[in-house]
Image: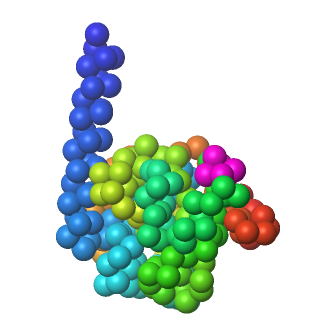
Amino acid sequence: MRRKRDREEGRRAADAHVGRAARILRGGGVIAYPNESVYGLGCLPGNEQAVERVLNLKGRDRSLGLILIAGEWEQFDGWAAELFTAPEFGELRKSEGITWVVPASSSTPEWITGGRDTVAVRRSLHPLAAALSLALDSPLVSTSCNPHGMPPARTEVQARSYFEAEVDWVLPGECGPLEGPSEIRDAVTGAVLRPA
């Protein structure tokens, strides 16, 4: 009985945290949040000022582009070109834990693509990250939570030590079991651009 009550309390706390994070992001904020392997820095991808904050926090050049994550593949509609939904990409949509570089929609801004005609997307397997994107009905910007040249934060404590004063909130939670950043593949050629 106590174990069931603890699980329910944990679920309510997680729901409250996701709700708070969603409100911050809708308001143009930037948060740190747990993902499959490391903490990420994120914001809503359509908010150029928030994206600039993320890039400045990381010391990341805008031309590198950013990864978008979502709880469901359908959330990339409007960000990835219609070609992404074509039958030949069916196997891609069955994959888990891989970031895919796919043709970008013509309306996807250069602050996401880095000026390319492609966009990097991943269906997140992390329950909090996925729940947050579903609550927002939007993909999230996802880049590792660390200043350039430093190791990515794998815990809430590390995320806070890097950016607590600079982000609007650090979403509590544990990262998933993956050891490092996701593998990145080109969806058209199948080439591995970054090994796992």
Residue 46, percent across and down?
35, 76
State the scheme by which the image is colored: rainbow
Residue 18, percent across and down?
28, 49
**Residue nearest the observer in this picture, 85 or 97:** 85
The quarter of the rendered structure image containing the N terminus is top left
Q: Give the range drawn in magenta.
A: 90-95
Q: In this view, does 55 lie above or below 123?
A: below
Q: Is residue 60 above or below residue 92?
A: below
Query: What is the residue that sits farthest to the top in this orientation?
Result: 1
**Residue nearest the observer in this picture, 78 or 7:** 78
Query: Quarter-wise, where is residue 20 in the image?
Result: bottom left
Q: Which residue is drawn at 33% across and 65% down?
A: 31
Q: Which residue is drawn at 41% across and 62% down?
A: 139
Q: Residue at x 39, y 73 (%)?
A: 45
Residue 117, percent across and down?
60, 83
Query: Quarter-wise, where is residue 42 in the image?
Result: bottom left
Viewer can see residue 97: no
Viewer can see residue 4: yes
Q: In this view, does 7 lie to the left or right of 139?
A: left
Q: In this view, does 53 lie to the left or right of 169?
A: right
Residue 194, percent across and down?
72, 67
Q: Does the magenta stretch include residue 93?
A: yes
